Image (cartoon, helix red, strand yellow):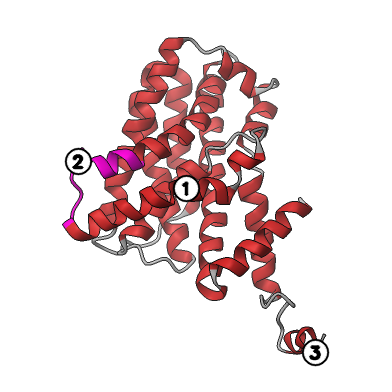
Amino acid sequence: MAMETEALSVGLDFTGMTPEDLAALRRAVRSLEHPGLAARLTNMVGKPIELIGDVLPASATHAIATATSKGLEAALKVALRTMQRTPHAGSQLLHKALATASGAAGGAFGLATLPIELPVSTIIMLRSIADIARSEGEDLSEPEAALSCVQVFALGGRAGSADASQSGYFTVRGMLAKSVTEAARFIAERGAIEEGAPVLVRFITLVASRFGVVVTQKVAAQALPVVGALGGAAVNYAFIQHFQEVARGHFTVRRLERVYGKSLVRTEYERLAQDH
Protein backbone atom coordinates (compact mmCIF):
# COMPACT_ATOMS: atom_id res chain seq x y z
CA MET A 1 0.00 0.00 0.00
CA ALA A 2 2.86 2.34 0.83
CA MET A 3 4.38 1.65 -2.59
CA GLU A 4 1.11 2.54 -4.33
CA THR A 5 0.85 5.79 -2.32
CA GLU A 6 4.43 6.74 -3.19
CA ALA A 7 3.86 5.98 -6.88
CA LEU A 8 0.72 8.10 -7.00
CA SER A 9 2.49 10.98 -5.24
CA VAL A 10 5.01 11.25 -8.09
CA GLY A 11 2.38 10.92 -10.82
CA LEU A 12 2.80 7.20 -11.54
CA ASP A 13 0.21 4.47 -11.82
CA PHE A 14 0.73 1.67 -9.28
CA THR A 15 2.22 -0.36 -12.15
CA GLY A 16 5.02 2.21 -12.35
CA MET A 17 3.75 3.82 -15.57
CA THR A 18 2.65 7.43 -15.85
CA PRO A 19 -1.05 7.99 -16.62
CA GLU A 20 -0.05 9.36 -20.05
CA ASP A 21 1.96 6.26 -20.91
CA LEU A 22 -0.75 3.95 -19.63
CA ALA A 23 -3.28 5.77 -21.83
CA ALA A 24 -0.90 5.43 -24.80
CA LEU A 25 -0.59 1.70 -24.12
CA ARG A 26 -4.37 1.39 -23.94
CA ARG A 27 -4.64 3.02 -27.39
CA ALA A 28 -1.95 0.67 -28.68
CA VAL A 29 -3.89 -2.37 -27.45
CA ARG A 30 -7.00 -1.13 -29.23
CA SER A 31 -5.11 -0.71 -32.53
CA LEU A 32 -3.12 -3.93 -32.35
CA GLU A 33 -5.70 -6.37 -31.01
CA HIS A 34 -8.70 -5.19 -32.99
CA PRO A 35 -7.47 -4.52 -36.54
CA GLY A 36 -10.32 -2.71 -38.24
CA LEU A 37 -9.65 -2.95 -41.98
CA ALA A 38 -12.06 -5.83 -42.65
CA ALA A 39 -14.86 -4.02 -40.79
CA ARG A 40 -14.18 -0.77 -42.66
CA LEU A 41 -14.23 -2.54 -46.02
CA THR A 42 -17.36 -4.46 -45.10
CA ASN A 43 -19.13 -1.18 -44.30
CA MET A 44 -17.84 0.29 -47.56
CA VAL A 45 -19.03 -2.49 -49.87
CA GLY A 46 -22.06 -3.61 -47.88
CA LYS A 47 -21.15 -7.27 -47.40
CA PRO A 48 -18.61 -9.32 -45.37
CA ILE A 49 -15.28 -8.81 -47.09
CA GLU A 50 -13.87 -12.14 -45.83
CA LEU A 51 -16.56 -14.01 -47.79
CA ILE A 52 -15.73 -12.13 -50.99
CA GLY A 53 -12.03 -12.94 -50.57
CA ASP A 54 -12.81 -16.65 -50.19
CA VAL A 55 -14.30 -16.82 -53.70
CA LEU A 56 -11.51 -15.07 -55.60
CA PRO A 57 -10.22 -17.24 -58.49
CA ALA A 58 -6.95 -19.16 -58.17
CA SER A 59 -5.31 -16.80 -60.67
CA ALA A 60 -6.08 -13.89 -58.34
CA THR A 61 -4.59 -15.72 -55.36
CA HIS A 62 -1.36 -16.29 -57.29
CA ALA A 63 -1.23 -12.67 -58.47
CA ILE A 64 -1.76 -11.44 -54.89
CA ALA A 65 1.02 -13.67 -53.54
CA THR A 66 3.46 -12.50 -56.22
CA ALA A 67 2.58 -8.80 -55.81
CA THR A 68 2.77 -9.06 -52.01
CA SER A 69 6.30 -10.48 -52.10
CA LYS A 70 7.38 -7.93 -54.70
CA GLY A 71 5.92 -5.08 -52.64
CA LEU A 72 7.66 -6.22 -49.45
CA GLU A 73 11.00 -6.66 -51.22
CA ALA A 74 10.71 -3.08 -52.47
CA ALA A 75 9.76 -1.90 -48.99
CA LEU A 76 12.75 -3.70 -47.46
CA LYS A 77 15.11 -1.92 -49.84
CA VAL A 78 13.58 1.44 -48.91
CA ALA A 79 13.80 0.60 -45.19
CA LEU A 80 17.48 -0.28 -45.43
CA ARG A 81 18.28 2.79 -47.52
CA THR A 82 16.59 4.80 -44.76
CA MET A 83 19.28 3.46 -42.40
CA GLN A 84 21.93 5.33 -44.35
CA ARG A 85 20.37 8.76 -43.95
CA THR A 86 17.82 10.63 -41.85
CA PRO A 87 15.14 11.96 -44.20
CA HIS A 88 12.78 14.72 -43.20
CA ALA A 89 9.53 13.48 -41.75
CA GLY A 90 6.75 13.43 -44.29
CA SER A 91 3.10 14.28 -43.90
CA GLN A 92 0.80 11.42 -42.93
CA LEU A 93 -1.91 13.13 -45.00
CA LEU A 94 0.43 13.30 -48.00
CA HIS A 95 1.14 9.58 -47.71
CA LYS A 96 -2.59 8.88 -47.59
CA ALA A 97 -3.18 11.08 -50.65
CA LEU A 98 -0.50 9.27 -52.64
CA ALA A 99 -1.80 5.84 -51.64
CA THR A 100 -5.35 6.94 -52.45
CA ALA A 101 -4.26 7.96 -55.95
CA SER A 102 -2.55 4.62 -56.57
CA GLY A 103 -5.68 2.86 -55.31
CA ALA A 104 -7.82 4.72 -57.83
CA ALA A 105 -5.82 3.09 -60.60
CA GLY A 106 -6.27 -0.30 -58.98
CA GLY A 107 -10.01 0.21 -58.71
CA ALA A 108 -10.34 1.39 -62.30
CA PHE A 109 -8.25 -1.32 -63.96
CA GLY A 110 -8.60 -4.20 -61.54
CA LEU A 111 -6.29 -7.09 -60.78
CA ALA A 112 -4.11 -6.43 -63.84
CA THR A 113 -2.59 -3.36 -62.16
CA LEU A 114 -1.85 -5.07 -58.82
CA PRO A 115 1.81 -5.98 -59.63
CA ILE A 116 2.47 -2.26 -60.21
CA GLU A 117 0.05 -0.63 -57.78
CA LEU A 118 0.77 -2.75 -54.67
CA PRO A 119 4.56 -2.16 -54.58
CA VAL A 120 3.90 1.59 -54.96
CA SER A 121 1.32 1.54 -52.15
CA THR A 122 3.62 -0.57 -49.96
CA ILE A 123 6.56 1.82 -50.36
CA ILE A 124 4.32 4.81 -49.59
CA MET A 125 3.09 3.03 -46.47
CA LEU A 126 6.64 2.09 -45.45
CA ARG A 127 7.69 5.75 -45.57
CA SER A 128 4.68 6.65 -43.44
CA ILE A 129 5.51 3.86 -40.97
CA ALA A 130 9.13 5.08 -40.77
CA ASP A 131 7.92 8.60 -39.90
CA ILE A 132 5.79 7.15 -37.10
CA ALA A 133 8.73 5.08 -35.85
CA ARG A 134 10.96 8.17 -35.67
CA SER A 135 8.26 10.10 -33.83
CA GLU A 136 8.24 7.36 -31.17
CA GLY A 137 12.01 7.63 -30.70
CA GLU A 138 13.29 4.88 -33.01
CA ASP A 139 16.81 5.19 -34.45
CA LEU A 140 16.32 3.98 -38.01
CA SER A 141 20.08 3.81 -38.58
CA GLU A 142 19.86 0.58 -36.56
CA PRO A 143 19.02 -2.50 -38.70
CA GLU A 144 16.61 -3.93 -36.12
CA ALA A 145 14.60 -0.69 -35.99
CA ALA A 146 14.47 -0.46 -39.80
CA LEU A 147 13.29 -4.08 -40.03
CA SER A 148 10.64 -3.36 -37.39
CA CYS A 149 9.09 -0.95 -39.89
CA VAL A 150 8.68 -3.80 -42.39
CA GLN A 151 7.46 -6.04 -39.55
CA VAL A 152 4.39 -3.79 -39.24
CA PHE A 153 2.99 -5.34 -42.44
CA ALA A 154 2.82 -8.69 -40.64
CA LEU A 155 1.39 -7.21 -37.44
CA GLY A 156 -1.37 -5.50 -39.44
CA GLY A 157 -2.10 -8.60 -41.50
CA ARG A 158 -4.29 -10.37 -38.98
CA ALA A 159 -7.92 -11.18 -39.56
CA GLY A 160 -10.09 -9.88 -36.77
CA SER A 161 -11.92 -13.20 -36.49
CA ALA A 162 -8.77 -15.30 -36.21
CA ASP A 163 -8.02 -17.43 -33.15
CA ALA A 164 -6.61 -14.97 -30.62
CA SER A 165 -4.05 -17.52 -29.44
CA GLN A 166 -2.52 -17.51 -32.92
CA SER A 167 -2.98 -13.88 -33.87
CA GLY A 168 -2.32 -11.76 -30.77
CA TYR A 169 0.24 -8.98 -31.12
CA PHE A 170 2.90 -10.57 -28.93
CA THR A 171 2.31 -13.99 -30.50
CA VAL A 172 2.91 -12.69 -34.03
CA ARG A 173 5.82 -10.54 -32.90
CA GLY A 174 7.32 -13.57 -31.17
CA MET A 175 6.98 -15.67 -34.33
CA LEU A 176 8.96 -13.03 -36.22
CA ALA A 177 11.53 -12.28 -33.49
CA LYS A 178 14.17 -14.82 -34.51
CA SER A 179 13.94 -13.87 -38.17
CA VAL A 180 14.20 -10.13 -37.35
CA THR A 181 17.24 -10.73 -35.12
CA GLU A 182 19.01 -12.89 -37.71
CA ALA A 183 18.29 -10.44 -40.54
CA ALA A 184 19.44 -7.46 -38.44
CA ARG A 185 22.68 -9.26 -37.54
CA PHE A 186 23.26 -10.17 -41.19
CA ILE A 187 22.77 -6.57 -42.34
CA ALA A 188 24.97 -5.18 -39.56
CA GLU A 189 27.78 -7.57 -40.45
CA ARG A 190 27.57 -7.04 -44.22
CA GLY A 191 26.81 -3.33 -44.08
CA ALA A 192 24.48 -3.59 -47.06
CA ILE A 193 21.54 -5.56 -48.38
CA GLU A 194 22.24 -8.58 -50.58
CA GLU A 195 19.31 -9.48 -52.78
CA GLY A 196 18.37 -13.12 -52.48
CA ALA A 197 20.22 -13.65 -49.19
CA PRO A 198 18.43 -16.61 -47.51
CA VAL A 199 18.05 -14.83 -44.16
CA LEU A 200 16.31 -11.87 -45.83
CA VAL A 201 14.18 -14.10 -48.05
CA ARG A 202 13.03 -15.97 -44.94
CA PHE A 203 12.09 -12.70 -43.23
CA ILE A 204 10.12 -11.46 -46.26
CA THR A 205 8.34 -14.81 -46.61
CA LEU A 206 7.17 -14.71 -42.99
CA VAL A 207 5.90 -11.14 -43.30
CA ALA A 208 4.25 -11.86 -46.67
CA SER A 209 2.24 -14.75 -45.22
CA ARG A 210 0.50 -12.24 -42.90
CA PHE A 211 0.45 -9.21 -45.18
CA GLY A 212 -1.24 -11.28 -47.89
CA VAL A 213 -4.35 -11.66 -45.69
CA VAL A 214 -5.01 -7.92 -45.79
CA VAL A 215 -4.01 -7.55 -49.44
CA THR A 216 -6.60 -10.21 -50.31
CA GLN A 217 -9.28 -8.21 -48.46
CA LYS A 218 -8.23 -5.07 -50.32
CA VAL A 219 -8.29 -6.78 -53.74
CA ALA A 220 -11.64 -8.40 -52.99
CA ALA A 221 -13.15 -5.00 -52.21
CA GLN A 222 -11.63 -3.34 -55.28
CA ALA A 223 -12.79 -6.20 -57.53
CA LEU A 224 -16.46 -5.51 -56.90
CA PRO A 225 -18.19 -3.83 -59.89
CA VAL A 226 -19.80 -1.26 -57.59
CA VAL A 227 -16.40 -0.05 -56.37
CA GLY A 228 -14.57 1.23 -59.45
CA ALA A 229 -12.00 4.02 -59.42
CA LEU A 230 -13.61 6.14 -56.72
CA GLY A 231 -14.12 3.15 -54.44
CA GLY A 232 -10.62 1.89 -55.19
CA ALA A 233 -9.22 5.16 -53.91
CA ALA A 234 -11.32 4.87 -50.74
CA VAL A 235 -10.16 1.29 -50.22
CA ASN A 236 -6.51 2.35 -50.42
CA TYR A 237 -7.17 5.22 -48.03
CA ALA A 238 -8.55 2.72 -45.51
CA PHE A 239 -5.61 0.40 -46.28
CA ILE A 240 -2.91 2.93 -45.39
CA GLN A 241 -4.88 4.29 -42.40
CA HIS A 242 -5.04 0.74 -41.05
CA PHE A 243 -1.27 0.28 -41.21
CA GLN A 244 -0.60 3.74 -39.79
CA GLU A 245 -2.69 2.83 -36.75
CA VAL A 246 -0.92 -0.53 -36.36
CA ALA A 247 2.47 1.21 -36.69
CA ARG A 248 1.55 3.75 -34.03
CA GLY A 249 0.54 0.95 -31.68
CA HIS A 250 3.67 -1.13 -32.38
CA PHE A 251 6.16 1.69 -31.92
CA THR A 252 4.31 2.94 -28.84
CA VAL A 253 4.83 -0.48 -27.28
CA ARG A 254 8.52 -0.46 -28.26
CA ARG A 255 8.97 3.06 -26.80
CA LEU A 256 7.39 2.01 -23.52
CA GLU A 257 9.56 -1.12 -23.43
CA ARG A 258 12.66 1.07 -23.61
CA VAL A 259 11.40 3.06 -20.62
CA TYR A 260 9.82 0.40 -18.37
CA GLY A 261 11.25 -2.89 -19.62
CA LYS A 262 9.63 -5.56 -21.77
CA SER A 263 8.23 -7.63 -18.92
CA LEU A 264 6.23 -4.85 -17.26
CA VAL A 265 4.88 -3.53 -20.57
CA ARG A 266 3.76 -6.99 -21.70
CA THR A 267 2.06 -7.65 -18.36
CA GLU A 268 0.14 -4.37 -18.57
CA TYR A 269 -0.62 -4.89 -22.26
CA GLU A 270 -2.14 -8.31 -21.63
CA ARG A 271 -4.17 -6.98 -18.69
CA LEU A 272 -5.57 -4.19 -20.87
CA ALA A 273 -6.23 -6.62 -23.74
CA GLN A 274 -8.44 -8.70 -21.47
CA ASP A 275 -10.53 -5.61 -20.73
CA HIS A 276 -11.19 -5.16 -24.44
Residue 184's tag is none
Q: Is residue 109 visible from the viewing direction of this image?
A: no
Task: Identify the magenta region.
Answer: 190-203
In 3D space, how far apart are the residues under numbered discs 2 and 1 (Cα atoms)?
21 Å
Which residue corresponds to mark 3? 2
Q: Dot 3: what SS?
A: helix
* Residue 172 spot, x, y in % from top left: 52, 45
Is residue 18 something that shows in the picture? yes
Relative image position of residue 170 (x, y in whole percent):
56, 51
Find the distance from the CA under tag 1 to the CA under tag 3: 41 Å
Q: Is residue 70 above or below residue 88?
A: above
Q: Quadrant of residue 143?
A: bottom left
User: Residue shown at 45%/60% (left/top)?
Assistant: 133
How packed is label 1: few (under 14 Cα within 10 Å), some, or many (20 or more)? Answer: many
Amino acid type, mark 1: Val
Residue identifier under label 1: 152
* Nearer to us: label 3 or label 2: 3
Magenta stretch holds residue 78: no
Q: Secondary structure at mark 2?
A: loop
Q: Amino acid at mark 3?
A: Ala
> What percent of the width, then of the height, locates residue 276?
76, 50
Mark before the other along the chain sequence, 1 or 3? 3
Residue 145 placement, left or right of 200: right
* Viewer-closest of 172 and 148: 172
How packed mark 3 is, by other alpha carbons closer than 10 Å (few <14, some 14-19, many 20 or more), is few
Residue wearing tag 2: 195
Query: Residue flagged by tag 2: what amino acid is it?
Result: Glu
